[in-house]
Amino acid sequence: MVLAGGCATVPRTAAPPPAPDAAALTIVAEIALERGDCSTASATYAKAALLASAAVAQRASEVGLACEDLPAAWSSVQRWRELAPQSRQAQALYATVALKLYRIADARAAVQAFFSLPAAHGRHAADGGLADLTTLLLQECDPPEVFAALHGIVDTTNASSARLTLLGELALEAYDARAAAGYAARAVRASPDDPRANRLLARAYVVLGQPAKAIAVAREFMRAQPRRGRFALADVYQQLGRVEDAHQELERLRADDAPRAQVDRHLAVLAYDAGDLREAQQRFAELATSGEGDEATLMYLSDIAAREGDVQAALAGYGKLAQSSMGLQAREKAAALLLTSHRQAAALALLQRYARQHPEDEVDVTVAEAQLLADHGGAAAALKLLDTGLSTHPEHPALQYERAIVLEQAGRVSESVQALQGLLARRPDDPTVLNALGYTLADHGLQLAQAESLIRRALVQMPDNPAVLDSMGWVRLREGDAKGALPSLERAYQIGHDAQIASHWGQALWAACRHEAARKVWAEALARNPDSKSLQAVVARFVPNAQ
């Protein structure tokens, strides 16, 4: 047989696609950025980073972080650190992204490498770059994560008062008052006249529930520095909730010719915190008309107008703050007022305009918008918004966390628990997630033993967080141990003065047959938070004739 195969047409093999070109990818990414397509830009830059130089990997890391595309940022910053192991910038950004993903061990390793490298000569060369690194980390991450990355890594041998105070302030923001007091005490020994260190030490003692020590620190600082420390004792009394003592001390300072505007500002804040809106409004108004007011003064006046039902005046005040450093906070409050007035479109437009003007805050604005919608009966719209946000910012923990919280608000408790469990699997030992999951279980009477275990794990990392202390008291009350719930709830309220905490504390007191004490707690909390619907509902249930 003659083979005919030689006459057959040989099929052509398709040519392989051209290998990705780093330069072309970079151009595509930059064009996407110019068009506002952050998602394409960060993903494309992440591909370019795997093929190009350290400079491209750096740009890719910065774009991924700015676009809040954490998977892309993590891929890019790992590459940058690999290509530039001697770069402090690479180590710092690597630590930042690692913290956002709650990769604490990775962040600590990068921080350790950061401090092992020579510091650049500059403004913060004396502290080895700690101030700049801390500022960068806090821009992107919450204090508990930042403190977890720095604590025990930063060398404090023969450290300056400034370095110790910075670490102490961070510890206090991370809800670890014992560590804060330790740093502050060393700072005061290093520089007894340092006002920041003295204020920090006094505040740490307040949070620790050691008022005598706090007052002693304030008095000693006032004695050593009569001018720089003149308000120290008044501040401590106010932090302790001793309103009358604080008022008397401020009047004494006025008689001693302390700066009138400073005294009035302290008195105004004191009156506001105590729920005396008439006095607070009068004092803040006097500060504003005398030219001594600031952005905070206008915010207080707007808040007072809102609490007194003068929506128009409140919106006008918040509007004046819209372009200030307090712009997002002011817009959130204005949006809440508009939603209460059933003006949803106007409310959301306020936040969306801010997001367009500040694209770097897009995730924060999305979370704020979702919270407002959920709080005003729009849980379904909030979930849709968060799902859209997650499509643009995949696996973003803030969006995932808020979605779990909104699911619970929508009554989808099982889905909320599953979402929090999934988030915890990706962020093991994250105290915020531990607390949220524990509280959700406790609040719905589910798996109380597990709920308590989760909350205890959160307390190990944030022993002075009022929200976590409240959760511990609440789960103990749910377990039927009213007496055991009281210490945590009392301490939580002393630290935070939150209406929800007061609600729980009062209920525990009531269950422990201390009805008069419960009434007193609720009355004080209502004076501070007269608009709290949850607190009003609890008081109406237990003391129906109280209002």
Image (spheres, rainbow, N blue to C red):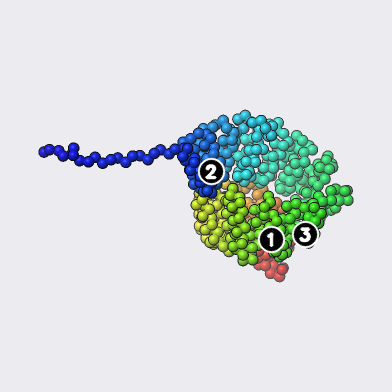
Above or below: residue 189 compared with residue 395: above
Which residue is labeled 2 in the image?
Answer: 64
- Helix, strand or loop for disc 3: helix
Q: Is residue 119 left or right of residue 4?
A: right
Residue at the top extreme of this rendering:
118
Which structural element holds mark 2?
helix
- Name the residue that disc number 1 marks: 315
Q: Is residue 182 above or below residue 247?
A: above
Q: Quadrant of the N terminus?
A: top left
Furthest residue in direction left, as rendered: 1
x and y percent of residue 479 in the render? 60, 57
Query: Any mark on residue 259, and which?
Result: none
Q: Is residue 305 visible?
A: yes
Confirm whether residue 449 shows in the render. Answer: no
User: Could you tell me the amino acid type at mark 1?
Assistant: Leu
Furthest-bottom residue in view? 545
Question: Crowding at label 3, few (<14), some or many (≥20) Cα neighbours within 10 Å?
Answer: many
